[in-house]
Image (tube, helix red, strand yellow):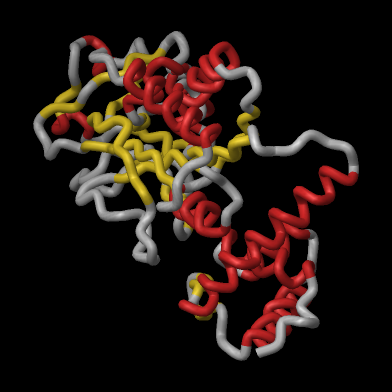
Amino acid sequence: MDFSDVSLTALRVFREVAERGTFTAAATALGYTQSAVSRQIASLERAAGAELLERRREGVRLTAAGHLVLRRATTVLDQIDATARELAGLPAQAGTVRVGWIPSAGAALLPRAVTALRRSHPAITVTTREGTTPALVRALRAGSVDLALLATAPPFRPPDTESPPLTLRTLTERSLRLAVPAAHPLARGDFVDVADLRGQCWIAGPSAGEDKLMGVWPGLDERPEIAHTARDWLAKLHLVAAGCGLTTVPASLVPAAPPGVRVLPVRGGPQEQRRLLLAHLPAQLTEAAGLVADALRTAALDADAPL
């Protein structure tokens, strides 16, 4: 085992692969060819004298040795980046907290928390990035974000099976809702009966691999008619407002619904509960990250008032 010739490039590539989950995604993010990424990983594995990544059809997974190397690589790269900032005369990033968030958290909860932090702790800088729950879990493991807002549905399993387990806190647990055009017959009441969802037209997110976005009510006993696909939540809601179909939304998005949309509960079927989780690595949070976590919890409590 000899790390004396390991380059910073190899460490950065390895961290990117661990975060992105595939060589292809890492190559795209870094602007490299896939073969260049493969060469860097191969050189790192030779230096480690062990396989760092388990290659699977759906992507890669860190081995036990890979987890160890990732922790050390993250420490080294963070120290190098901090040194570069100091040499460039830039302020230290001790007060910077990196937050990852699922799309449904970005419309109302996250802006509310950031606004409150600007008033109460203006010295803290919050940087954010959007992602799916699996991608954000990898980002936490790779040290690319400090906190992550994740989504989970029954049976509410942990977001991954890696060790050590992530520290998780449930911010909200609320039922899935249905967004209906205001002029639609289903919008006349205070709820929608699940039996009335048969034969409806739907606006859904594209489903590919890990990126399964909501749109169609779960458990329908028919093949749904999907009239429009949209990845962005607000685009879906505006399509609903235009009368193009129905879509599901988590309760956290209700404040962001545009005019022309009614958001209603669905009755008559299994309860479709959704949890919003705040996740971080089990290590002690920095003071700044702890304050950001507190602001997110407070914003979630405000958003969780009965509708």
Kindly indicate the quadrant of the structure image that contains residue 78: bottom right
Residue at 19% across, 12% down: 190
Instruction: Residue 38: give x, y in percent of width and height.
Output: 70, 78
Q: Is residue 231 visible?
A: no
The answer to whether residue 3 is above or below residue 106 is below
Which residue is nearer to you in this view: 19 or 73?
Answer: 73
Residue at 47% across, 21% down: 108
**How many marks do you count on the picture?**
0
Instruction: Residue 302: give x, y in percent of width and height.
Output: 35, 16
Residue at 55% across, 53% down: 139
Which residue is nearer to you in this view: 4 or 232?
Answer: 4
Describe residue 191's horizontal placement relative to residue 17 as left or right: left
Instruction: Residue 22: give x, y in percent of width and height.
Output: 59, 68
The answer to whether residue 140 is above or below residue 21 is above
> Quadrant where the C terminus lies?
top left
Residue at 51% across, 15% down: 116
The answer to whether residue 298 is above or below residue 98 is above
> Quadrant where the N terminus lies?
bottom right
Which residue is nearer to you in this view: 86 or 252?
Answer: 86
Instruction: Residue 95: give x, y in percent of width and height.
Output: 64, 33
Describe residue 139's horizontal placement relative to residue 261 as left or right: right
- As drawn, the residue found furthest toward the right would be 88
Q: Is residue 58 visible?
A: yes
Describe residue 193's horizontal placement relative to residue 210 as left or right: left
- As drawn, the residue found furthest toward the left would be 268
Kindly indicate the quadrant of the structure image that contains residue 268: top left
